[in-house]
Amino acid sequence: MTPLLAYIEGVGMIGPGLADWPHAADVLAQRAARVASQTVLPAPASLPSAERRRTGPVVRAALAAAHEAVAQSGRDAATLAAVFAASGGDGGNFHAICETLASDEPQLSPTRFHNSVHNAPAGYWSIATRAMAASNVLCAYDGSFAAGLLESLAQVSVDGAATLLVAYDTDYPEPLRRVRPIADAFGVALVLAPRKSERTLARIEARLTDANASSFADADIEALRLSNPAARALPLLQALACGKTSQVVLDYLDGTQLAVDIDPS
């Protein structure tokens, strides 16, 4: 495939023991140690109170990362096209729906239903930011971040417009966790632009490869990378945190991975 390129203008992240991108960057660059703890998901203040009360972990993870990336980029969130990528959705909500349907009174609330669809975070994002630009939502199991990055890079290359990528997944309660053992919530977001500017953090170029995915010698960070599909972004995030020209390989499909060259500005 022809390599796809873009310029990163903003990064957002939230995860276990990682409150935001500056904190995560210090950990990934070994300037600080990660203290293991559950992900703390803030209520999205950008939403009206009624919608805010209805949000679950998956929406909160997605919006926390997205808002941080857009704020760093300095762009108007309402003008950005967006790609949302997740392997699943709100696992707690799915569990509650299954319990309700198996009960003697299988009546679902409208909130349960509209939070069950895969594009719920994208819908809440459009409400929060009044975004009217195109928004795509996709799923590729453990390769969802790489799939979202490819889609975002393709949009930037074809449309010549900045695009927001948001990847996220949250944990599942038992018994769903037995078949989908995601440990905790994780969200990451990138603002990608077609041209270099004063806001540019790094230039990235991606192409398919059959090389093995990058892993970490640090057992704690490697366990985190494997614990959530969105956390497969960590090798790319580490390269950004260290500010060094490098190449990483991200999990994508069986036998096909995504090689990404990173050139900090």
Image (spheres, grey):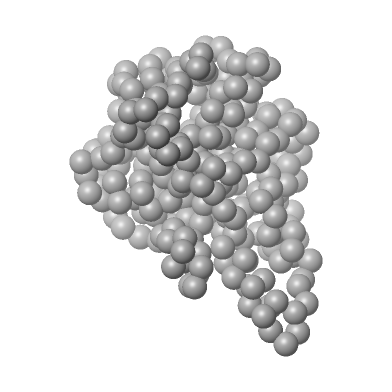
Query: Is residue 160 positioned above or below 184 on the image?
Result: above
Outermost residue to the bottom: 104
The spot of residue 18 in percent (x, y) is 39, 49
Q: Residue at x 38, y 16 (%)?
A: 263
Left or right side of 5 for 162: right
Outermost residue to the front: 255
The spot of residue 17 in percent (x, y) is 36, 54
Query: Is residue 64 positioned above or below 109 on the image?
Result: above
Q: Residue at x 62, y 66 (%)?
A: 94
Foreground: 136 or 239? 136
Q: Residue at x 29, y 46 (%)?
A: 222
The spot of residue 127 in percent (x, y) is 75, 46
Query: Is residue 151 positioned above or below 227 on the image?
Result: above
The spot of residue 193 in percent (x, y) is 57, 19
Left or right side of 38 for 74: right
Q: Quadrant of the C terminus?
A: top left
